């Protein structure tokens, strides 16, 4: 998703020691990065980036590869009705749901090789470490590829983890369409990944969910730290803004008699930026962006009569996101009045601010500390863990990315940082599995 992360004050968390029997287990840097490069075989672009949209042919290929590879490490597979893939390795107590290690393999149309993909690869590295050392953990483990996290082809973002987490219905999600009118449900069927399992926590539960993701921001890069501890995710709202004016001839219509929808849209973009840079939300981390503009009729000698804008609003606090939205609406209405325009405003997606589970965060924090990392971050971007956290204990690990760049072919994380992400995940997961083992021993 989007670029943004903010430092946070440390919080007190419980101590969870890792069993001494796991001291010799470590992620393999060369193997982790080889797996990452293999995962980028399908959909790579000449500029070094990725273009692997949900349910295109490259997405089918990488799904097939994911299933084939994880079978080698003792996994069986469950595919749900939204195409989410669960590669499950049995544990000692298979009456328990698996501990999930999840992220996504879909990308932006001009994305990089790390956003989402690294999280799945780190989960696969955990499987390989367990398999190579003949370790059977107490609970089962599942590496999860969540469908359509990016929302680039079928908006909104985090769509199919959202179905699993109860935010959306499967009917709604399967009916989402791309710009060509193809539905997600039809495309899942086309590539053979509309599975038989209902997409819900109740039908297909997890015990917990860890996610590794590149930071998509500059904090770790500036601090020269490979990994960070994610405390939670800031509040996000997405809105569609429709502007209706009047089409007219550019050569014959006087400037003072125009109802120019595109001119109004331009002023709204400026007003959006003013609100988050000059009002009271600016020092509190408020952010708002208009990055989608669709104007009609797209004729050089016709004044635009209709414009649709996509507005992205974010802030650490839900109240500030609501305030920014209110100020945008008020500012946009003034612009419409000035230019004789009409406006529709649809707030079509809301992701409230959240804090991750303290025990899970503690597992990450202590594992990161073993690598000399102690930076705690609130994510400015949404992730699949937003929706898993509604149902199960959840935590995230951030990996440093160069200059904080993401959603761009230049997106890059050093090999040693990718391995540090896998190492932190491995040890955080083993800590939590031990925690579950001890909890059951007391029953």
Image: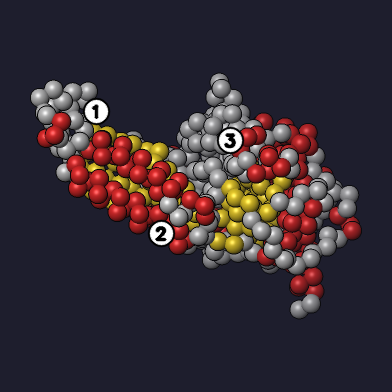
Residue depicted at x 35% and y 57%: 326
Q: On the image, numbered disc 3 is attached to which residue? A: 405
- Position above or below: 169 against 29: below
Q: On the image, numbered disc 1 is attached to which residue? A: 298
Q: Position of residue 363 (x, y in %)?
A: 74, 59
| SS at mark 2 in the image | helix
- Residue 58 visible, this orientation: no
Tell which residue pokes out farthest to the bottom in this image. Answer: 443
Q: Which is closer to the viewer, label 2 or label 1? A: 2
Tell which residue pokes out farthest to the left in this image. Answer: 252
| Marker disc for residue 322 | 2
- Position above or below: 161 against 267: below
Residue depicted at x 55% and y 21%: 46
Residue 170 appears left or right of 132: left
Q: Position of residue 419 (x, y in %)?
A: 75, 40
Residue depicted at x 22% and y 23%: 300
Closer to the camera, 283 or 3? 283
- Residue 389 visible, this orientation: yes
Answer few, some or many: residues within 10 Å of disc 2's Cα (few below 14, many 20 plus, some between 14 and 19).
some
3D distance between C-alphas at marks 2 and 3:
28 Å
Answer few, some or many: residues within 10 Å of disc 3's Cα (few below 14, many 20 plus, some between 14 and 19).
many
Answer few, some or many: residues within 10 Å of disc 1's Cα (few below 14, many 20 plus, some between 14 and 19).
few
3D distance between C-alphas at marks 3 and 1:
32 Å
Q: Position of residue 111 (x, y in %)?
A: 53, 33
| SS at mark 1 in the image | loop
């Amino acid at each position: 998703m989007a670029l943004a992360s903010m430092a946070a004050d440390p919080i007190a968390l419980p101590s969870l020691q890792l069993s001494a029997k796991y001291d010799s287990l470590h992620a393999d840097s060369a193997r982790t990065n080889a797996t990452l490069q293999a995962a980028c075989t399908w959909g790579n672009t000449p500029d070094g980036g990725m273009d692997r949209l949900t349910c295109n042919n490259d997405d089918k290929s990488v799904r097939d590869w994911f299933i084939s590879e994880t079978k080698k490490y003792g996994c069986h597979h469950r595919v749900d009705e939204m195409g989410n893939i669960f590669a499950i390795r049995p544990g000692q107590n298979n009456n328990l749901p698996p501990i999930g290690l999840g992220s996504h393999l879909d990308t932006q149309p001009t994305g990089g090789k790390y956003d989402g993909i690294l999280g799945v690869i780190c989960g696969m590295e955990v499987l390989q470490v367990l398999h190579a050392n003949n370790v059977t953990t107490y609970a089962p483990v599942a590496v999860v590829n969540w469908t359509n996290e990016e929302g680039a082809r079928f908006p909104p973002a985090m769509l199919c983890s959202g179905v699993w987490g109860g935010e959306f219905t499967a009917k709604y999600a399967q009916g989402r369409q791309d710009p060509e009118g193809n539905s997600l449900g039809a495309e899942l069927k086309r590539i053979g990944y509309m599975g038989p399992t209902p997409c819900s926590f109740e039908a297909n539960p997890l015990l917990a969910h860890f996610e590794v993701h590149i930071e998509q921001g500059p904090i770790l890069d500036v601090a020269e730290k490979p990994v960070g501890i994610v405390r939670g995710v800031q509040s996000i709202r997405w809105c569609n803004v429709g502007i209706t004016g009047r089409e007219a001839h550019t050569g014959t219509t006087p400037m003072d008699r125009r109802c120019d929808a595109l001119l109004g849209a331009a002023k709204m973009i400026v007003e959006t930026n003013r609100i988050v840079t000059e009002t009271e939300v600016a020092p509190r981390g408020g952010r708002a962006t208009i990055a989608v503009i669709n104007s009609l009729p797209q004729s050089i000698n016709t004044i635009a009569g209709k414009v649709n804008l996509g507005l992205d609003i974010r802030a650490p606090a839900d109240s500030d996101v609501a305030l920014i939205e209110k100020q945008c609406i008020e500012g946009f209405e003034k612009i419409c009045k000035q230019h004789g325009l009409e406006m529709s405003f649809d707030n079509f997606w809301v992701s409230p601010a959240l804090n991750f589970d303290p025990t899970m965060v503690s597992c990450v924090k202590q594992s990161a500390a073993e690598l000399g990392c102690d930076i705690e971050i609130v994510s400015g971007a949404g992730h699949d863990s937003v929706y898993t956290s509604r149902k199960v204990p959840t935590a995230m690990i951030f990996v440093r990315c160069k200059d904080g760049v993401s959603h761009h072919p230049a997106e890059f994380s050093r090999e040693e940082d990718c391995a540090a992400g896998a190492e932190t995940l491995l040890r955080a997961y083993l800590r939590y599995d031990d925690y579950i083992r001890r909890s059951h021993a007391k029953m």
